[in-house]
Amino acid sequence: MAKPLRDLVPNILRHASAQRQAAEQLQHHWEQAVGKQLAAQTRVMALRKGALYVQTNDAGAHFTLNIEKPRVLQCLSQALGQPVTDLVIRAGDAA
């Protein structure tokens, strides 16, 4: 039997709030790992199955992230308390 909408809304709101908090926490740790300047040139898109997806349209930022990848992955893994095993850098607007 289907549940009334009034019973579902609180769970949906709690889930949305938890997702927003997780995204804010990830963004904070990203900035700590790469620094404010590099974080400003990138946008964290998602963390899926241990892979962190980020976007940048800056070739220098892309290059730097590739060079710093092992250190960034270790830093994020420690900060998040879960393994971050890959950093996927995609071209696109980071604004």
Image (cartoon, grey):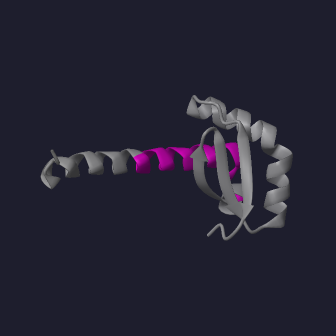
Of the pair 73 and 37, the residue shown nearer to us: 73
Residue 4, image x and y in percent?
13, 51
Of the pair 8 and 21, the residue shown nearer to us: 8
Q: Kindly give the residue lying farthest to the front in the view shown.
A: 1
* Number of callouts: 0
Of the pair 18 and 75, the residue shown nearer to us: 18
Residue 14, image x and y in percent?
29, 45
Residue 61, image x and y in percent?
79, 59
Magenta includes 21?
yes
Q: Quadrant of the C terminus?
A: bottom right
Residue 62, image x and y in percent?
80, 58
Q: Residue at x 78, y 37 (%)?
A: 71
Q: Residue at x 65, y 66 (%)?
A: 94
**Main SS type for the magenta part?**
helix
Q: Residue at x 35, y 51 (%)?
A: 16
Query: Relative to residue 12, is residue 2 drawn left or right?
Result: left
In the rendered view, tell whether residue 55 sits above or below residue 50. Answer: below
Q: Which residues are magenta?
A: 19-37
In the rendered view, tell whether residue 83 sits above or below residue 68. Answer: above
